[in-house]
Amino acid sequence: MQHVATGRGEQVDVRLPDGSQLRLDSATQLSVAFYRNRRDVTLTDGQALFAVQPDTDRPFHVTAGPSRVTVVGTRFTVRYLPAFAGDTGPVVAVEEGKVRVGRSEAKASEGMGAVAGAGAPGGGLPRADALLTAGQQLAVRTDGSPGTVSALPPEGIAPWRDRQLSFIDVPLSRALAELERYTDSGLVLRDPAVAALRLSGTFDTTDPASFRRLLPRALPVRLQPTPDGLEIRPLK
């Protein structure tokens, strides 16, 4: 078994023995294990881009929390950030080919199953599978059941490859936590009302000064120097 991890602000490219290629984003941890009849990756934290070498005899599985992504050959990303309280489960996005998203073996063994609305034999919960094609993404619920399949946003499958963070109407607290995965922002957020403000935009993860500079232009806030850093406060 091979373990791979990246530090804060680091990205790493990994070539697997079968020719598949991975790119790990900042603060990401995963393990890889190859068997005679399957290829398994377990993503424990972070996000990664997968370019999978086709092999019909050995499907490629990516387990992330309650979900498992199964492919033969394709290009896709999986995002799983369990430390973010209240977040959705894993997010899967497909750039090329097709993937099937279902519950991980651990969740399946709990009797929690897929296709929404279909009954399972014996009165159990239905099995949870969703088929994604190129240009689609899926945010899995925290219990492993599939959410709604949607089109990829305009910024594409993985803006983090270009050291970019893109937000569409997310709470400021979430945006700041995302930025902190890459670098020290120098910002302090204490006011719950300010934390709940919604932010949209694209920011450079290698340039936290630009985030600090642009934030007061995007939201009704000001940056107040404090002993702990620049506190984000409401405009008055």
Image (cartoon, grey):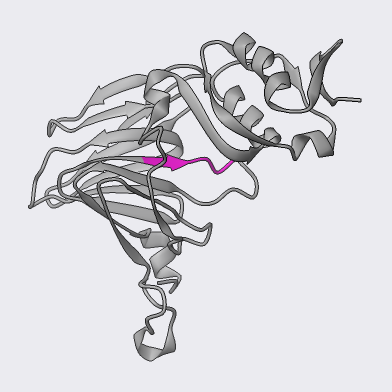
Please count the marks in the image: 0
- Which quadrant of the figure has residue 126? bottom left
Residue 167 percent across, percent down from the top left: 55, 34
> In percent of the image, x 73 and y 20: which residue is there?
216
135 displayed left or right of 175: left
Where does residue 177 sit, x and y in percent of width and height? 64, 30
In this picture, residue 90 sits left or right of residue 63: right
Write the residue at 36% across / 34% down: 156
Q: Which residues are magenta?
A: 78-83
Name, please, the residue furthest toward the bottom.
122
Q: Does 23 appear above or below 208? A: below
In the rendered view, would you say 204 is above or below 102?
Answer: above
Is 61 one of the magenta-colored residues?
Answer: no
Observer able to see residue 185: no
Quadrant into which the N terminus falls = top left
Residue at 83% of width from left, 30% of height from top? 190
Q: 44 or 87: nearer the eye?
A: 87
Residue at the right extreme of this rendering: 236
Queried whether the magenta region covers residue 82, the answer comes back as yes
Q: Is residue 10 visible?
A: yes
Q: Quadrant of the C terminus?
A: top right
> What residue is rendered at 55% in x and 10% in y?
207
Task: Tell me residue 188's x, y (percent).
Answer: 77, 22
